[in-house]
Amino acid sequence: MTVRISSAEWKGTLKEGGGTVKLASGVYEGPYTFASRFESGPETNPEELVGAAHAGCFSMFLADVLATAGFPATFVQTRAHVHLTAGPTISLIELETEVKAPGLTEEGLAEHATTAKENCPVSKALAGPKVTLKATLVR
């Protein structure tokens, strides 16, 4: 079993305070604030990190699904739009993926992308919010 560790520290009140998120791998460490989460501050925020994790997981999973089906992808690029609404609640995650895979049809992409959306580990972990998908085949 693989265990991945991330950490966060927050100092101060919700609106005036600030924090840092850190990956144990050392690849990323950065600040986050009330403004970066609920307004338009320049720092990161948990939803952005969730989106990156989801996009990365989905892209890898879809690449494997396609290769297993006989359509190895030249590339899979995914964007995750994570909607934070009042509550606060993550109410929607919209995945948009572009795929280049020789021989793959639009119908095949839709089927394989749906399989990846339903089965990638991050999608399963995030089963609470609605997760939508838009898949585009690039020729």
Image (cartoon, helix red, strand yellow):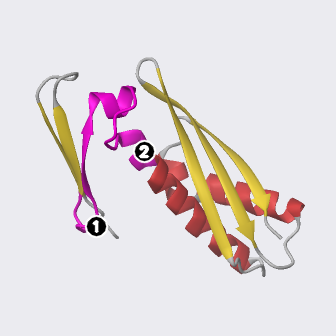
Q: Is residue 37 magenta?
A: yes
Q: CA distance from mark 1 to mark 2?
A: 16 Å
Q: Along the horizontal axis of the image, is 60 left or right of 65? A: left
Q: Is residue 79 above or below residue 13?
A: below
Q: Which residue is mark 1?
A: 27
Q: As drawn, which residue projects farthest toward the left? A: 12
Indicate the position of residue 122 as horizontal and vertical percent values. 49, 53
Quadrant of the rendered image containing residue 29? bottom left
Secondary structure category for the residue under label 1 = loop
Indicate the position of residue 3 as horizontal and vertical percent values. 30, 65
Identity of the residue drawn at 65% across and 68% down: 76
The crowd level at tag 1 (other Cα within 10 Å; few <14, some 14-19, many 20+) is few
The crowd level at tag 2 (other Cα within 10 Å; few <14, some 14-19, many 20+) is some
Q: Is residue 21 magenta?
A: no
Indicate the position of residue 8 as horizontal and vertical percent values. 20, 46
Q: Along the horizontal axis of the image, is 87 left or right of 127? A: left
* Residue bounds of the magenta highlight: 23-50
Q: Which residue is mark 2?
A: 48
Quadrant of the rendered image containing residue 5? bottom left
